[in-house]
Image: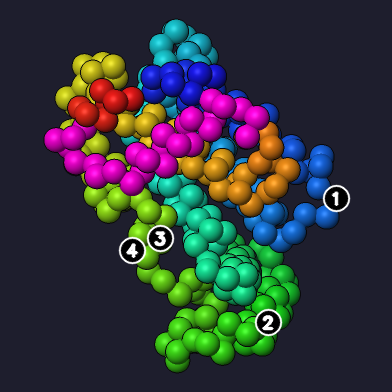
Amino acid sequence: MDGNDILSIKTLKQVIQFALNIWDTPSKELKNPSEEEVLAHHFFMKNIMASFTILNTLDPIPRRDMGDNHAFNDFMSGYVVLRSLFEGYTNMYYLLVDPNTKKEKEFRKLLWDKHAHQEWKNLTESSGSRLNEIPKCEKNIESVINKIKAHEYFGQLNTDDKSKALNPETWKLHGRNYLRDCTGIDNSLSDYLYKLMSNYTHAEAYSLRIIGLAESIKDVEEEFKLIMFTEMFTVLTIMIYSQTVSVVEKAINDDSSILVRIKLWEEYSRRSFKEENYKRFRKDL
């Protein structure tokens, strides 16, 4: 891959291929991975699967089983998956990069684990089929809460934050705006993404209007935006992954093209994104 290639489905494929090439590196080279490395690997896998799904949406297999050779491009559903990729990246950053100290990172991981057990309990209760597992879920939640209470960082919190930390239904002490700001992503870009990838795209008038205006998917600017944002957050995910899992860092440092893409998307994520600047984005890329 040439790091200076113009943004396209081709470059997105190349970025995803690079990610797949390093997919098994930790399992092959780390005998006893740390909790932090395991968490980074899980975020990495989740976001690469999401980006692969978006790629398959943009470049689909012809629907031969329907009796023709037509392949429609479901770009609006691609934005729904992109929401998962985007929030996966911000959560990954919040847990692994943003903490100022090792103690704070440990504490945030405990809140994440507590909430994971609570979500599993909620799903178990909703399904009604594995009710015998609920006592185990509750025991796991209690165990993590005890670790939270005993943690050095807990004693530094104010009363409100202590209450949040002990609430099984919450996993962070900060709101969505903090998660957005701590990544360094420009506010105009994150606001645009949250609007574009929420109800605007899921089933609201916006999505139907865009589809109705398009005679061909190639006429729709949304396709380029979907490629751009998918590659951006896939590359930034790879960046955090390499910063957390040392055995992956070498593979990235040995590939000048992915280093160029990392530098490119770090810079662009911090730029203002307004519709009037959109042509400049396309020209630069």
Could you give the CA–CA distance between mark 1 and mark 2, rounded to whole angstroms?
26 Å
| Quarter of the view holding residue 151 | bottom right
The residue under label 1 is 31
Colouring chosen for the image of the structure = rainbow
Q: Position of residue 203 (x, y in %)?
A: 28, 43
**Residue annotated with mark 4:** 177
User: Where residue 257 appears, x then y in whole percent?
Assistant: 54, 25
| Disc 3 to disc 4: CB gap under 8 Å | no
Labels 1 & 3 near each other (Cβ < 8 A) = no
Q: Earlier in the sequence, mark 2 or mark 4?
A: 2
Q: Residue 182 bears which disc, if any?
A: 3
Query: Is 160 situated above or below 219?
Result: below
**Prevailing SS of the magenta stretch:** helix
Query: Which type of secondary structure does the marked residue at label 4 adopt?
Result: helix
Residues shaded magenta? 253-278
Q: Can you tell which mark lies on residue 147?
A: 2
Residue type highlighted by circle 2: Lys
For mark 2, give the secondary structure. helix
Q: Which residue type does callout 1 highlight?
A: Lys
Residue 3 in the figure: left or right of residue 280? right
